[in-house]
Amino acid sequence: MSQPHDLVTASRQELADIIERHCNSLSGVHDTAIEALSLARMEQPSEGRMPTLYRPALCVIAQGSKEIRVGPEIYRYDELNLLVVSVTLPVCGQVVDASPEKPYLSLRLDIDPGELTRLIADAGLAGSTPRPAGRGIYLQRLDTSVLDALLRLMRLLDSPRDIAMLAPLYTREILYRLLRGPQGHLLHDLAMTDSQTHRVTRAIEWLNRNFDKALRIEDLAREVNLSASTLHHRFKEVTALSPLQYQKQLRLQEARRLMLSEGLEVAVAGHRVGYESPSQFSREYSRLFGAPPLRDLASLRNALGDAAMPA
């Protein structure tokens, strides 16, 4: 009875070894020769939750654990679970378990909605029975079918000449396994153009392009062909945020990036992302990041520098 468990343990250890090797034992987020795949390594827990923007992706931890806050909800995952993000979401993430002796190691595989649509058509899944909408982020037990496909993809990092031919095949298999999983309908709805979830996705994309503009829910609803009440309800169902709350987080995260990376002054950054009142900007910034802009940026530079938040 122990053999399957031993095999899974060995597979997870191999996954951790590959990530450690290709991170060169350096902390931070690392791109790979596979365009959609990135790796992360951290030697200590995060100092508080780091707001960031998650785009559609599969996230798997090979060692350690992490917490993700979406609106009022917290998702904690580790080596036993995978995290799927099916829509673009502003989140707050925190690495919980990490040490120099046993660093946090994870991978992130970006999900292409266009590839999902093609896969659904090819696999004959387009006529799947509709199921209730849910969050655009979910946890799922990391089963052997997904783990095996992930390992085949990760091993390509050690044989780069095979990446162009085999990486698309293994990525497609991973997406297929997720679509056939217990919460695959959430990914399915992302790709189906006639679903309300897809229309919410279009609203999310509009907000990401136009977060600095004034928001009228009636105009946004018209843009995605939904009633205002349906858009508000479905948007909150998928993101755990109202459209206005979502826009506010986008604005504040972009302002933080502008001040940190481009050196903009507080008032200039606030105005650039759509705030007319500097005091309102400072209040809302403090509410999201836990400190006024200048104090937050000083703390961030001291603790993290310009490092990206790991997946």
Image: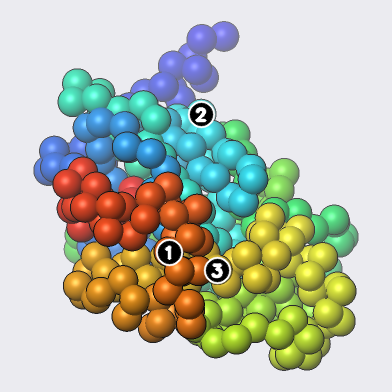
Q: Amino acid at mark 3?
A: Lys
* Residue that mark 1 sits on: 282
Specify the label residue 80 is tagged with: 2
| Color theme of the render | rainbow
Q: Amino acid at mark 2?
A: Leu
Q: Where's the N terminus, which quadrant?
A: top right
Query: Disc 3, disc 1: CB below 8 Å?
Result: no
Residue at screen point 75% across, 54% down: 134
Q: Amino acid at mark 1?
A: Ser
Using the rendered view, name the quadrant where residue 52 is placed. Answer: bottom left
* Direction from residue 252 to residue 98 in the image, left or right: left
Res 306 visible: yes
* Direction from residue 47 to residue 88 in the image, left or right: right
* Residue that mark 3 sits on: 248
Query: In 3D space, how far apart are the residues under numbered discs 2 and 3 (Cα atoms)?
Result: 34 Å
Q: Nearer the viewer, mark 3 or mark 1?
A: 1
Sooner in the amino-acid sequence: mark 1 or mark 2: 2
